[in-house]
């Protein structure tokens, strides 16, 4: 099989979890749409990033630079045509109305489901050698000429079949390694660092990230990285054969070069 059963199950469970986590996370962010560095942060403190709003204007501020987002973020109209000034609109949040308590319930439930799934996936991938066989980067692949060649093919929207024995090219391997072993664990750890219960029991978590507000900022940045990964992933899927590749992730598919006996 091109994709093992555990990989396929984790892929689709992850897709659901990340969708709910992002949308419920935006509900939580709506309660205080500002980001800080350090241990503390309040309305009067300087935020390095913020979503601002009024009855006539919506904007995103990063540092001292503002980007107007009226009609999309910060200032938008609901289904009844009424102007709302939450940071993110109802179609992007779970629940679709503002409720910090319900947003947290959705977020915490799917966060635990996601974390347990990631842990089981890593253990299973070590056991069935998915990590060693499919994500291992050989000396040949680390050559600058090889990486540059693969990068040029992607920029030219050329998606060639993988070499025999490899189901991923070098850019896919690097991306998946960064997402699975760096970004996703970072999201879990920063999420735990923001939890008051975890702060009380494991105060060293906030110290690792330089403060609770720093953990919150890193958590939000990680979410943006995952969104970027999702967009690139979907564009690549559409350009390289959406039906074939999606069906392979459902049924398992075959390794490149293999044929029916």
Image: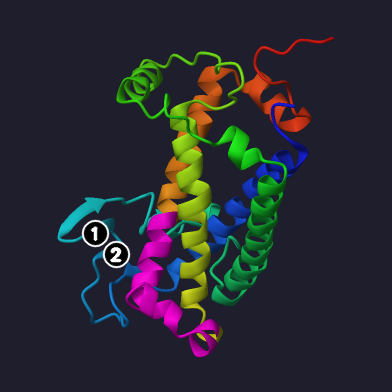
Determine whether, in the image, residue 137 is placed left or right of residue 64: right
Mark sitting on residue 61: 1
Determine whether, in the image, residue 4 is placed left or right of residue 158: right
* Quadrant in which residue 255 is drawn: top right
Q: Is residue 204 visible?
A: yes
Look at the image and tell me in which quarter the C terminus lies. top right
Give the residue at x 51% y 59%: 185
Determine whether, in the image, residue 1 is placed left or right of residue 50: right
**In this view of the protein, which residue sits in the foreground, 41 or 56?**
41
Q: Residue 207 placed where, x, y %? A: 37, 79
Do residues under tags 1 and 2 come within 8 Å of each other at their CB atoms?
yes
Nearer the N terminus, badge 1 or badge 2? 2
Look at the image and tell me in which quarter the N terminus lies. top right
Give the residue at x 28% y 56%: 60
Q: Residues within 10 Å of mark 1 (few under 14, many from 20)?
A: some
Looking at the magenta stretch, what is its main secondary structure? helix
Q: Residue 12 placed where, x, y %? A: 69, 43
First to last magenta residue range: 198-222
Dot 2 lies on which element?
strand
Q: Residues within 10 Å of mark 2 (few under 14, many from 20)?
A: many
Asked if the magenta segment contains residue 215, the reply would be yes
Asked if the magenta segment contains residue 189, the reply would be no
Determine whether, in the image, residue 198 is placed left or right of residue 246: left
**Residue assigned mark 2:** 50
Q: CA distance from mark 1 to mark 2?
A: 5 Å
**In this view of the protein, which residue sits in the foreground, 54 or 65?**
65
Decide: is 219 above or below 156.
below
Mark sitting on residue 168: none
């Amino acid at each position: 099989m091109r994709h093992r059963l555990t990989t396929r199950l984790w892929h689709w469970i992850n897709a659901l979890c990340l969708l709910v986590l992002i949308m419920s996370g935006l509900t939580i962010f709506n309660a205080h749409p500002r980001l800080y560095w350090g241990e503390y942060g309040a309305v009067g403190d300087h935020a390095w990033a913020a979503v601002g709003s009024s009855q006539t204007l919506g904007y995103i501020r990063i540092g001292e630079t503002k980007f107007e987002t009226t009609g999309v973020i910060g200032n938008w109209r609901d289904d009844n045509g009424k102007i709302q000034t939450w940071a993110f609109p109802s179609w992007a949040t779970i629940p679709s109305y503002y409720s910090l308590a319900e947003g947290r319930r959705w977020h915490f439930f799917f966060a635990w489901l996601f974390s347990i799934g990631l842990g089981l996936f890593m253990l299973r991938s070590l056991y069935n050698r998915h990590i060693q066989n499919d994500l291992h980067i050989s000396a040949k692949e680390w050559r600058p000429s090889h990486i540059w060649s693969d990068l040029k093919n992607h920029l030219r929207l050329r998606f060639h079949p993988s070499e025999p024995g490899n189901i991923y090219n070098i850019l896919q391997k690097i991306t998946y390694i960064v997402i699975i072993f760096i970004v996703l664990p970072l999201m879990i750890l920063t999420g735990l660092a923001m939890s008051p219960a975890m702060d009380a029991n494991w105060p060293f978590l906030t110290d690792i990230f330089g403060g609770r507000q720093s953990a919150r900022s890193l958590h939000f940045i990680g979410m943006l990285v995952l969104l970027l990964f999702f967009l690139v992933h979907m564009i690549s899927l559409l350009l390289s054969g959406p039906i074939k590749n999606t069906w392979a992730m459902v049924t398992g598919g075959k390794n490149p070069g293999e044929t029916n006996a």
